[in-house]
Amino acid sequence: MINHKKTHGLWADTAQPGPNLTSVDGDQKAEIAIVGGGYTGLSAALHLAEAGTDVILLEAEHIGYGGAGRNVGFVNAGLWLKPDDVVNRMGEKYGEQLLEVLGASPNLVFQLIEKHNIQCEAVRNGTLHCAHSPSGFKELQQREAQWHRRGAPVKLLSREEAAARIGSDSFHGALFDERAGTIQPLSFVYGLARAAQDSGARLHAPSPVTELKREAGLWRLDTPTGRITAKTVIQATLGYPSFAFQDRNKEMIPFNYFQFATEPLPEDTLKTVLPGREGALDTNPILSSFRLDQAGRLMVGSVGQVEKMGYAVHENWARRTIRKVFPQADSVPLSYAWNGRIAMTPDHIPRFHMSKENMISVTSYNGRGIGPGTMFGKLLAQLVLGASIDTIPLPVTRPKGILTRNFRGLFYETGARMYHFVQRRV
Ligand SMILES: Cc1cc2nc3c(=O)[nH]c(=O)nc-3n(C[C@H](O)[C@H](O)[C@H](O)COP(=O)(O)OP(=O)(O)OC[C@H]3O[C@@H](n4cnc5c(N)ncnc54)[C@H](O)[C@@H]3O)c2cc1C
């Protein structure tokens, strides 16, 4: 029986224990208030607390409730876009700076894991970007050339080399990126929370910020059980803004991604499915991802949601995909299904907002938020502590609604369902 009702699927069952938090009680003051208990908020809280700053973090539900507790767990070195596309869309200055900063973000994630002894199934064996077609292989050749121009350690693998690494002959080659790795994403965010607490940050959950107001030159953040007064606010609500931040939904396209996980594969099968434990994703515009967890469960994911009517179509697709791509694992039952909402922008570039009243946020990582969220949390902390704004590799923009967002969201969901209905039938 597939347990698909839980919002955080497999990760909820296999995560290390989370921190024990309570709601805000009464009136409190802090120098800096952070809203949102995902990677961005907790990395900011950790780096601020380590610098001796008085910081409070408020999370509406529980740590890792948003994308941080639901994602695939790929710690990628960069955005989903090709490097040259990032530069074309942002210009040379910001584009190259963003590529460099995000290219270094897996280092930060794995350093924090080591420094704070975070038990989160961390494996740094790289990712395989797998060509789903001959044109997908051409795209990987372009990616390789563009990364090599920037000195990044990526390597194109032939069809045969890729088949041996993936354990499947379904692909036309692959691009190996040794900077990347995989983690148990919910355990990582729990670990960040513990490290932030140990460094002196005050974390509260459930404490939804229901109202945010300026009062006597300070911010007042109301929650159902108490209120915080702070000089500066870091808003880190990303794909799950609620209550006082609901209007931020308007600046992203609703885009869901689901995952199915099998029971642990038998030992001899495990030797033939991603034997090097790399994360794998393909070049298909309706992307698929594949990975193993520590217990040897195979996870397959793609675009769409499994909470509602799309469940049967996507489940059927997941079963067919395993049969075609990893026939050796076909008989292993599926035991989890879950999905999450990705914060997507029309140009696939994150946004940086900053008001003159000391409210700052970086948002919309477009499905690449483990490295970027952890990195931007640190950069925002440093900015608040006095670093130059030039250290943020994004231009300051004003929040802007996307008029066609609901239509686009529906388009992606319907398109993914139709595609999954027909893909890999023969
Ligand atoms: C299905 C899926 C797969 C993904 N796969 C990957 C991947 O493999 N690799 C990768 O790098 N990225 C991936 N991502 C993206 C990544 O998960 C996000 O970019 C990342 O979680 C962003 O972290 P965050 O801290 O900015 O936001 P979130 O993790 O979304 O946290 C925001 C938090 O803010 C809280 N909040 C909202 N409103 C309020 C309020 N009013 N008061 C208090 N708290 C509030 C929410 O409850 C939430 O916990 C994926 C995302 C999804 C959904």
Image: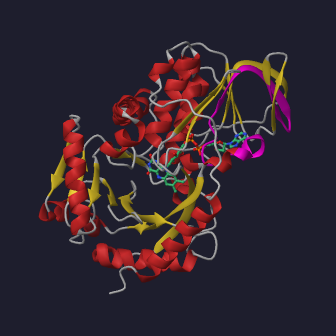
Asked if residue 418 is among those painted magenta in the image, a careful observer would answer no
In the image, residue 353 above or below residue 64: above
Q: Can you tell which quarter of the image residue 206 is in?
A: top right
Q: Let me know if residue 366 appears in the view.
A: yes
**Quadrant in the rendering for residue 426:** bottom left
Q: Quadrant of residue 232?
A: top right
Q: Is residue 230 magenta?
A: yes
Q: Is residue 198 depicted above or below 252 in this figure?
A: above
Q: Position of residue 129 (x, y in %)?
A: 29, 56
Question: In the image, what residue occupies the spot 55% across and 29% down?
Answer: 396
Q: Nearer the viewer, residue 190 or 385?
A: 385
Rendering coords of residue 349 (x, y %): 47, 43
125 to 341, vertically: above or below = above
Residue 332: percent from the left, percent from the top?
39, 75
Which residue sits at x=35%, y=46%?
85
> Above or below — where is 7 with respect to 117?
below
Relative placement, left or right, of 215 versus 328 is right
In the image, what residue occupies the spot 20% across and 71% down? 169
28 left or right of 59 in image: right
Residue 228, image x and y in percent? Answer: 79, 25
In front of the other: 247 or 72: 247
**Region in magenta:** 220-247
Residue 272 seen by the camera: no
Query: Which residue reaches farthest bottom?
Result: 426
Q: Is residue 29 left or right of residue 111?
A: right
The quarter in which the N terminus is drawn is bottom right
Count of numbered circles in the view: 0
